Image (cartoon, rainbow, N blue to C red):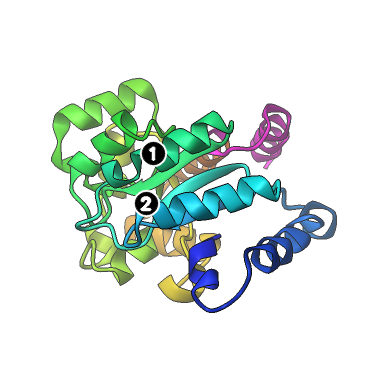
Amino acid sequence: MDPQAHLSRGVSLETCVNGVASALATSQEDFGMSTLLIAAFLRDLSEESALEVLDGLLAMNAPIAGIGLDSAEVGNPPAKFERLFARAREAGLRLTAHAGEEGPPSYIIEALDILGVERIDHGIRCMEDPDLVERLVADRIPLTVCPLSNVRLRAVDTLADHPLPAMLAAGLNVSVNSDDPAYFGGYVDDNFSQLKAVFDLSDFDRSRLAANSIHSSFASEERKAELLDELNRG
């Protein structure tokens, strides 16, 4: 959820949070889908704006599991939001950030070393830095890759050019995700089906990608165990 995007249209923080949270509250009961809410901040806006919104979320005890960083990556390095992530860490929130999709591999390093994130959203440009790849593999840092979004944003020219197979081969902890489906051309199953068509992913690779996504999520350990058991039985 991007609270700042809604605030700019005159939607109050309370309306934004309560509207989304009310739908998520019954997602498992209604659809069998467990959910958590991450408040993401627009990196092309100021850190002061982000801090103000985070303080508002904390003051209202918003049901958020963590914070993220998204939107225009180039020219807005992770270091710009060092205070924001320190504040979220103090509040006990989980930390993730978009890095290394449109921005350079150095943005991934900044997100890890300066922001202290535990997960990288996208991260495909890590493949340009062998030392970084070695670090990500050794530390099992999750990379939530969104192939159809990468194509739509021209981070790669075509799906056939996507580095996902090479990332798997390198031993990276990569998973397949949807980004914003309405904007970027597909839900998770669309991403999987198109990847299978282009790369002929094996059942083993698809199972590994699914398991990586479970391990990399912010779900409870109990919920992860349930999902992994379901995957293994499937």
Q: Position of residue 87 (x, y in %)?
A: 48, 36
Give how far apart the Cα atoms at labels 2 and 1 are. Answer: 8 Å
**Image mark for residue 64:** none
Going by the numbered disc 2, the residue's amino acid type is Glu
Q: Is residue 230 left or right of residue 111?
A: right
Residue 94 higher or lower than 63, as above or below: above
Residue 111 higher or lower than 76, as above or below: above
Q: Are marks 2 and 1 in contact (CB under 8 Å)?
A: yes
State the residue in front, 18 or 61. 61
User: Taking the image as drawn, is residue 217 in sight?
Assistant: yes
Going by the numbered disc 1, the residue's amino acid type is Arg
Q: Position of residue 159 (x, y in %)?
A: 29, 64
Other residues around mark 2 within 10 Å, as few (<14) / some (14–19) / many (≥20): some
Residue at the farthest bottom position: 9
By secondary structure, the bulk of the magenta-drawn segment is best described as: helix
Residue 62 higher or lower than 193, as above or below: above
Q: Position of residue 7 (x, y in %)?
A: 54, 70
Quarter assignment of residue 226: top right
The residue segment tinted magenta is 215-234
Q: Earlier in the sequence, mark 2 or mark 1?
A: 2
Report the residue marked by disc 1: 83
Report the residue at 40% width, 45% height from top.
Answer: 97
> How many numbered discs, if any?
2
Residue at the farthest right position: 29
State the residue in front, 193 or 154. 154
Quarter assignment of residue 174: top left
User: Taking the image as drawn, is residue 171 in sight?
Assistant: no
Q: Is residue 48 left or right of residue 233?
A: left
Report the residue marked by disc 2: 47
Report the residue at 22% width, 62% height from top.
Answer: 156
SS for dot 1: helix
Q: Quadrant of the N terminus?
A: bottom right
